[in-house]
Amino acid sequence: MTADDASTRPERRATGGRSRQRVVAALAVLVSGGAAFLLASSALDLVREQLHHNCGMQPPGSEGAGTWFCSDGIGYLGIAGVLGMGWLAVVLSGVLIALLVRPSGQARPALVILAAVSAAWVLGLTWSGSTTNVQDQYAPMTGAEYWIEAVGPAAMVSAIGIAVGVLSLLPTGPLSWILGIVAIVLLVVATMLQPGLSLNLVPAVGLLTAATVRAIDVDTVLGRRPRQARQARQRDASRGRASG
């Protein structure tokens, strides 16, 4: 094997490793998007049964007092469509960024920003609906208070998780992907606290996973072979000068 072959093999290995890294990152986003779609019905349970969007109570003393009366399924098509558009946009964008953007320094911030957008999308929309679409004048709590009770803990954990995800962009090396893993775990916990947010929080988990995968240094994973190849080239060059 010639010196040129020895020098190009580690480079080809690193190039192949980075390509596989991008594929794994894209698959993380795609799988999370599929899982979120399967859990989409939980969003309707959240907005109707827990947040009482498009619902109201009858006055005290009347028939049905103390009971929520809500719109039929058609009344929730709007919120379903808006949440679905957010889901589709972040999943498609995340897959394309994870797969096609080669520099990790550009791909990772974009993926983390998409995760933040996905979380903010569902939290903002459910908050807005709770403050405007709940007829709470005869209810024991306001629409905002129902949101705080049902979504507040998950929203807080989500915010912390996204903040940690942003912090993971600052360092390099193992600390970066360790912070990324912490952010992923926090988003998973938030989803478990309120499964009704799954349609948009699960893709955020996938996006943070993709950003963490892209944070791993391929050359480090491959070990010291590239450095050994450089040393071999230097030895070959020294022998050539000595023989000359």
Image (tube, helix red, strand yellow):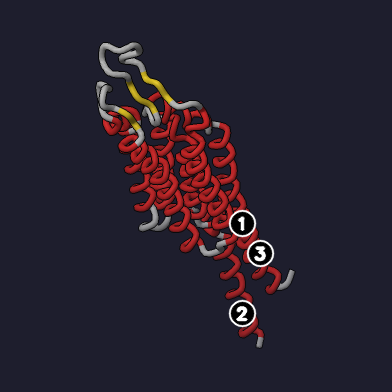
Label 2 near label 1: C-beta < 8 Å? no
Q: Quadrant of the N terminus?
A: bottom right
Q: Pick whichever, 172 or 35, lies toward us.
A: 35
Q: Nearer the viewer, mark 1 or mark 2?
A: 1
Q: Could you tell me residue 57's position as x and y percent?
A: 33, 21
Calculate the distance from the C-alpha at mark 1 to the C-alpha at mark 2.
28 Å
Res 226 → quadrant: bottom right
**Left/right of residue 113 with respect to residue 136 in the rendered view:** right
**Left/right of residue 119 with respect to residue 16 in the rendered view:** left
Q: Does residue 126 lie above or below 91 as drawn?
A: above
Q: Is residue 178 visible?
A: no
Q: Secondary structure at mark 3?
A: helix
Please tell me which residue is depicted at 49% across the width and 48% down the height of the picture: 207
Q: Does residue 112 lie above or below 145 as drawn?
A: below
Q: Does residue 99 lie above or below 30 as drawn?
A: below
Label 3 near label 2: C-beta < 8 Å? no
Q: Could you tell me residue 88's position as x and y percent?
A: 55, 47
Q: Which residue is mark 3?
A: 12
Q: Secondary structure at mark 2?
A: helix
Q: Nearer the viewer, mark 2 or mark 3?
A: 3
Please tell me which residue is depicted at 28% across the width and 18% down the height of the picture: 59
Q: Quadrant of the C terminus?
A: bottom right
Q: Could you tell me residue 126's position as x and y percent?
A: 38, 37
**Left/right of residue 160 with respect to residue 17 in the rendered view:** left
Please tell me which residue is depicted at 40% across the width and 21% down the height of the picture: 69
Q: Pick whichever, 222 or 78, lies toward us.
A: 78
What's the residue type where badge 1 is placed?
Gly
What's the residue type where badge 3 is placed?
Arg
Q: Is residue 227 visible?
A: yes
Q: Which residue is mark 1?
A: 17
Rendered image: mark on residue 237? 2
